[in-house]
């Protein structure tokens, strides 16, 4: 069972407009899916620079990234 946590974040207006344009063109995506995909990719890319890039956090981020990217998230 997947547990979700709500996040409130302020982003630049230009970024929000770009996101809205993307979502209008891709109806199978929503704000939550975009944020989860982007955040997990960010963490994956930055985990590689850590001493142990194959930690449980790395594999968890990889799983979340792939599930949200391909629409398999629960």
Image (cartoon, rainbow, N blue to C red):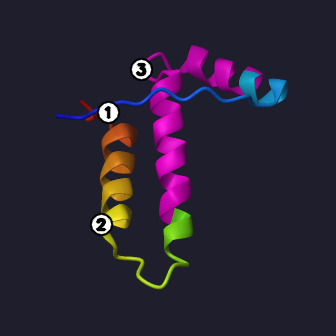
Q: Which residue is mark 1?
A: 71
| Quadrant of the image containing the C terminus | top left
What secondary structure is marked by label 3?
Answer: loop
Residue at the spot x=41%, y=20% of the render? Answer: 28
**Which residue, as the protein is rendered here, is positioned at the far bottom?**
51
Q: Quadrant of residue 60?
A: bottom left
Q: Give residue 30's position: percent from left, percent from top.
A: 49, 21
Which of 39/24 is in front?
39
- For the residues marked 1 and 2, what is the alpha-carbon distance in whole angstroms? 22 Å
Residue at the spot x=51%, y=79% of the render? Answer: 50
Q: Which class describes the residues within 10 Å of circle 1: few (<14), some (14-19), or many (20+)?
A: few
Which of 1/23 is in front?
1
Q: Quadrant of residue 4?
A: top left
The residues colored magenta run 17-44
| Quadrant of the image containing the N terminus | top left
Q: Give residue 16's position: percent from left, percent from top.
A: 73, 24
Height in image: 69 above or below 26? below
Q: Which residue is mark 2?
A: 56
Q: Main secondary structure of the magenta part?
A: helix
Q: Give residue 34's position: percent from left, percent from top.
A: 52, 33
- For the residues marked 3 and 2, what is the alpha-carbon distance in whole angstroms? 29 Å
Which tag, 1 or 2, sits closer to the chain's start? 2
Is 41 included in the stretch rendered in magenta? yes
Q: Which class describes the residues within 10 Å of circle 3: few (<14), some (14-19), or many (20+)?
A: few
Q: Which residue is mark 3?
A: 28
What secondary structure is marked by label 2?
Answer: helix
Q: Is residue 32 left or right of residue 59?
A: right
């Amino acid at each position: 069972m997947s547990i979700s946590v709500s996040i409130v974040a302020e982003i630049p207006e230009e970024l929000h407009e770009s996101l809205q344009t993307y979502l209008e063109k891709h109806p199978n995506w929503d704000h939550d899916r975009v944020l989860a995909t982007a955040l997990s990719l960010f963490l994956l890319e930055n985990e590689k620079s850590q001493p142990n890039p194959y930690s449980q956090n790395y594999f968890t981020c990889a799983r979340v990234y792939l599930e949200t990217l391909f629409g398999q998230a629960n």
